Amino acid sequence: MCENLKKIKENDCGELHYCKSCKIYHLLFNNFHFVLKIEEYKALKNHINKIDIEFWLDKFGDTIVKRKIPIPTLQENLILVFDIYEFIALKSLLNNENKKVGRILYLSTDQIEYQTILN
């Protein structure tokens, strides 16, 4: 791992670092550590930004699967899957510029994982 890492952005799910000497991005997300060259970082960022969250939430809306947003990889037997919170956190890390990305997505009550206690 590089010794001259500069933290670019951080949220509850992970961190994005950059090493100027190696010109490598380090994306630490939950239990994954991605080491990306600049071209790979840009390609991942573009791919993530093109994914239609609403499509996947509708497609798997009636299933009991918690993580409904798949991201295929070049490794045939590996697909990364995210719930809506993880996906938004990943997108936030990759879009490290302080600008608005995409349109606002509203959650339905069944997509909010929060234990309510009625008094």
Image (cartoon, rainbow, N blue to C red):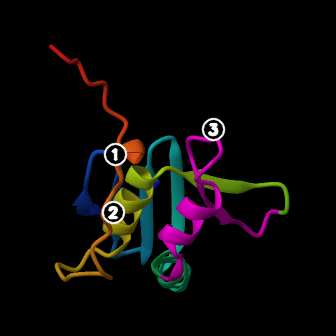
- Which amino acid type is marked by label 2? His
Q: Amino acid at mark 1?
A: Thr
Q: At 84% from the left edge and 55% from the top edge, which residue is drawn?
A: 77
What x and y, as percent, mark residue 73?
71, 66
Do callouts 2 and 3 mark residues in contact (Cβ within 8 Å)?
Answer: no
Q: Earlier in the sequence, mark 2 or mark 3?
A: 2
For residue 95, above or below residue 34: below
Q: Is residue 16 above or below residue 37?
A: above
Please state which of residues 32 and 47 is positioned toward the viewer in this rendering.
47
Q: Which residue is mark 1?
A: 109
Q: Kindly indicate whether the residue at mark 1 contacts the one at mark 2 (C-beta within 8 angstroms).
A: no
Q: CA distance from mark 2 to mark 1?
A: 34 Å
- Residue 94 pos. (x, y %): 37, 71
Q: Quadrant of the C terminus?
A: top left
Task: Give, as a single range, the part of the protein colored magenta.
Answer: 50-75
Residue labelled with disc 3: 64
